[in-house]
Amino acid sequence: MPSGLPRGISDRSRRGWGPGASGTKMIRNLLLLGAVLLSLTTAVAQAPRTVVVRAARMLDPVAGRIVPNPVVVVSGDRIQSVGGNPPAGAATIDLGDLTLLPGLVDAHTHNLLQPDDEVTPPILTKSQAYRAIEGVAAARKNLDAGFTTMRDLDSEGAGFADVALRDAISKGVVPGPRLLVATYALTITAGHMNNAGFNPDIALPEPATLTDSRDAMIAEIRREVKYGADWIKLYATGTLRHVNRETLEPLAQVSLDEVKAVVAEAARWRKDVAAHAYGGAGARNAVEGGVRSIEHGWILDEDLLKLMVQKGTYWCPTLSVFRPEAGLETPTEFSRRVVESHKRTFQNAMKLGVKIVFGTDVGAFPHGTSNREFSYMVEYGMSPLEAIRSATVRAAELLRMDKEIGSIAPGRFADLIAVQGDPQESPIRDEGRRRLQT
Ligand SMILES: [Zn+2]
């Protein structure tokens, strides 16, 4: 998340969608089936169990159409068939008048970060053990909000606790979304994710790894891979405190040569690189250097957006974390300009055909409220269906998991959620939810 924001960017007061939330049609239930968790935990001990899931409708985000009366057969943690005759005698979950959807993906999260960490740097005040426990609670909330997969883009100083959380979830020790984790982020001395304003005579742990040369970056990637990273996170620009208040020019943290080296080293280990980049030269170097996704990007100009289309670079806008409702109690002229630029960039990106993926920066604001991003995307002009695609099929492509998640089809993981009404008509909201244990 953009730490170093003007104070108060995080949400310490609002939790979820209050009664004042705008919008015409509320979807009352976002309901998550326990199929994945159930199967992951039971698969170890016994033969895969078969469950038949029925509902009034199913949204197929690939075709962009509603399928009436779907019958989805789940065996173990996978979808066995969609449509056709269900096996006789199998347990059935009938969801009645709900609409089935593939589980949602939030491609920019921080399960190890909590809103209060925006006030006091957790690296200085909380133990890793305590942060891991907070992460367990966060993961559960995010799962219950319908997010069955999350790319967790750095532990913000909680070390390899994200690897531990990922593994505990996948082994069924605790409930949570499937996680793809980045461990430490790569940054530079004086750049993003540095402790700022402390006594230089006291050695303090830093929330990211300070990699001040190409060689240091390469060595850090190897260390992260060794200890379990799925993705490499690179700070290609600074944070908001580095942004020029006049021109909005961000601090460029990396050269083209460095990005190329980072991408090549990550590729050696079959890892992809996500670059935190607002815009300017740092973002251009990231795109030209071949990162797979640009994070935030609230001031990407048209030329760069065109280059992203050309190179197939994905973009996670994380609109939520820059919106004042996410916690900036007193919006300033500067924050208003950032939000305005973000909106303009989002609309240009849509027009030019950039691959926009749903990502929120949840953790900087309360876990379990990522759904707010859908409303912002729709407010800025995206259709509810496209917003859902960004959180399902397109996110699955970004993660190179399109054969595994993001759609309801035979062979995919049985990541299923259900909502009331037709989610093509209004953005998915979060109004009460329950998780079925089967
Ligand atoms: Zn972030």
Image: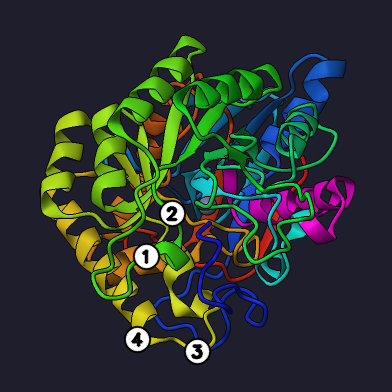
Residue tagged by mark 2? 238
The amino acid beneath tag 2 is: Gly
Q: Rounded to the nearest whole Å, what is the CA distance between mark 1 and mark 3?
A: 19 Å
Q: Which mark is residue 330?
A: 3
Residue 84 as seen in the image, left or right of residue 142? left
Q: Residues within 10 Å of mark 4 (few under 14, many from 20)?
A: few
Residue 275 as seen in the image, left or right of residue 96? left
Q: Rounded to the nearest whole Å, what is the CA distance between mark 3 and mark 2?
A: 23 Å
Residue 131: in magenta span: yes
The amino acid beneath tag 1 is: Val
Do the residues bearing badges 1 and 2 touch, measured as CB atoms within 8 Å? yes
Residue tagged by mark 1? 243
Q: Nearer the viewer, residue 274 or 396?
A: 274
Q: Nearer the viewer, residue 378 or 80?
A: 378
Is the residue 154 above or below the residue 278 in the image? above
Label 3 residue SS: loop
Q: Residue at x 67, y 78 (%)?
A: 12
Q: Residue at x 46, y 67 (%)?
A: 241
Q: Which residues are magenta?
A: 124-149
Q: Rounded to the nearest whole Å, what is the CA distance between mark 2 and mark 4?
A: 20 Å
Residue tagged by mark 4? 333
Q: Position of residue 55 (x, y in %)?
A: 52, 48
